[in-house]
Amino acid sequence: MLKRNQITVDNLDIVKEIHRNNTREKEIQQVLKKENRLSWEENRIAYIEGRIYVPNNKRLKEKILWENHNVVDIGHPGLQRMIELLKLNY
């Protein structure tokens, strides 16, 4: 799980794109208003339970899937494992 200021080289392009998108659905806006240590916003990137919030943007979600599909050091993890790996950061 990513902690504050822990952005890896692998997801830097995605984070930049999320930063540019900057869309916040009503539910996420409500979560960010709550005072807790699990959700925060930093540099226009929302973190929910320590993970990067991905706006409801089909192109952005497809890019995340594409970039994480055949990771060199893991290979093709299969559907369930890929979902688990993505949930670590997003």
Image (spheres, rainbow, N blue to C red):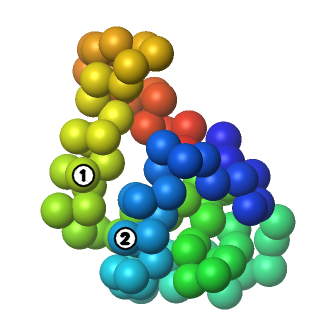
Percent of width and height locating residue 78? 28, 14
Q: Quadrant of residue 18?
A: bottom left
Q: Is residue 27 left or right of residue 49?
A: left
Percent of width and height locating residue 48? 61, 62
> 42 or 74: nearer the eye?
74
Image disc number at residue 12: none
Per the model, the C-alpha gap separating discs 2 and 1 is 10 Å
Q: Secondary structure at mark 1?
A: helix
Callout 2, which amino acid?
Answer: Glu
Q: Number of callouts in the render?
A: 2
Residue lying at 27% horizontally and 29% vertically, measured from the top left: 69
Percent of width and height locating residue 21? 34, 81
Q: Decide: marks 2, 1 in contact (CB < 8 A)?
A: yes
| Residue beneath disc 1 | 63
Whether residue 80 is situated above or below residue 21 in the rendered picture: above
Q: Is residue 87 left or right of residue 38?
A: left
| Residue beneath disc 2 | 17
Residue 64 seen: yes
Q: Secondary structure at mark 2?
A: helix
Percent of width and height locating residue 50? 68, 54
Residue 38 seen: no
